[in-house]
Image (tube, rainbow, N blue to C red):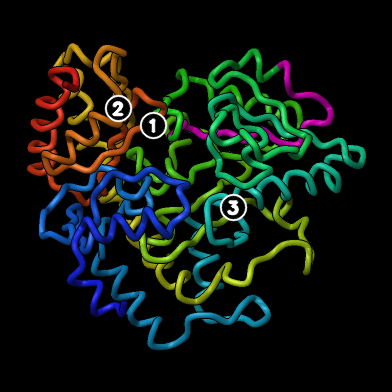
Amino acid sequence: MSTDQVAGTRTEELLALAERYAAHNYHPLPVVIASGEGAWVTDVEGRRYLDMLAAYSALNFGHRHPRLVGAARRQLEQLTLTSRAFHNDTFPVFCRDLARLAGKDMVLTMNTGAEAVETAIKTARRWGYDVKGVAPDRAKIVVADGNFHGRTVTIVGFSDDPSARGGFGPFTPGFESVPYGDVGALRDAIDDDTVAFLVEPIQGEAGVIVPPEGYLRAARELCTERGALLMADEIQSGLGRTGTTFACEHEGVVPDVYILGKALGGGIMPLSAAVADRDVLGVFRPGEHGSTFGGNPLACAIGIEVIDLLREGTYQRRSAELGSWLIEGLRDAALPTVAEVRGRGLWIGIDLVPSAGSARAACERLMGRGILAKDTHQQTVRLAPPLVVERSDLEWALEQVVDVLSTPAG
């Protein structure tokens, strides 16, 4: 089947092809999307849906943002890949711009979020040995219960999600997990061998869990006091999603390492990075870490434009204002099926009571109304529309969500 023939293929046939030939590592909703623009997508049958997931925040700027597509198109006509064996003309500009956006000295580029987390882990260990003076093979990284940092073997080894861990051991040692939001447990866990605390400022996959006020500030103080790096996984929470450029800003916290991805590539190319000062990222020497595609000219050209969009502050303000309105609207609805509404900016978790049925069933019903959302952990519906979404579209979406969640799934 050529790409021209794909255009005429119907939903049932494409779903059957996916079932037959694609590994079953995801359980997607039964919709086949063929095109998208802004906050809206259209399936192969011509039905339109409001995208309320934004590819887990990778599409913060919407589908086919004209400035991002323009940057990609221009770069496609010039150069797409050199590897890091040679310099290219977009890589250094991207690194400069991202370092300035984060207020840091250096950038280490990768592709996926999980790669950026792995990079941060290697950074912390090398820093611990070379700078802090931890004895060889003794470095410890503290993480939080309920975390989601990716799905490599090392990362799932410190997850407490049975579906992520089961059947993939043995796991990499050197990690200790403490309850999320518990400052006392964090204080007890940090010892002389601790090189870093790796944390999501808001836990996304866990259900958009916002920590108690002051938690990140206390973590910053503890890490500074004990000589450990504070590493903030802002792969989903960063780049405007929560109403600020970085979610850490809500508590006035600056981590030692920002871990970024998803929206950094504009929803067009995978692009991720660890961003830190020279005394941290400067521990690497040639040959000790890298990626053939990391820092490729095409992704960096898009990333430069993403950073330029963020400098304007428009998307951060939209997220803050529209998110506050939507969260308030959901809470004011006082739905009998809803146990709790959490969120910050345009990132919202809706916990359903057990009698309401599963979150998956709720998302299927929303899909029937023209809204694409995603469930997590059985009872939570996540909402994370592109930051370009119109207020009128959110008003319509709120009506649909309230209507669907007014009664349990039948």
Residue annotated with mark 2: 359
Residue 212 vs residue 140, the one in the foreground: 140
Residue 179 showing in the rendered view: yes
Residue 62 vs residue 303, the one in the foreground: 62
- In-image side of 305 versus 117 (left or right): left
Disc 1 residue type (three-letter): Thr
Q: Which mark is residue 376?
A: 1
Residue 118 in the image: above or below residue 176: below
Q: How far apart in space, not on screen, are marks 2 and 1 (Cα)?
A: 7 Å
The residue at 45%/75% (across/down) is: 298
Disc 2 residue type (three-letter): Ala
Residue 270 in the image: above or below residue 318: below
The residue at 37%/67% (across/down) is: 305
Mark nearer the N terminus (3 vs 1): 3
Mark nearer the N terminus (2 vs 1): 2
> Magenta span covers which residues?
188-204
Q: How far apart in space, not on screen, are marks 3 and 2 (Cα)?
A: 30 Å
- Quadrant containing the N terminus is bottom left
Rendering coords of residue 405 (x, y %): 17, 23
Q: Quadrant of residue 71?
A: bottom left
Q: Residue furthest right?
A: 135
Disc 3 residue type (three-letter): Ala
Residue annotated with mark 3: 116
Q: Nearer the viewer, mark 3 or mark 1?
A: 1
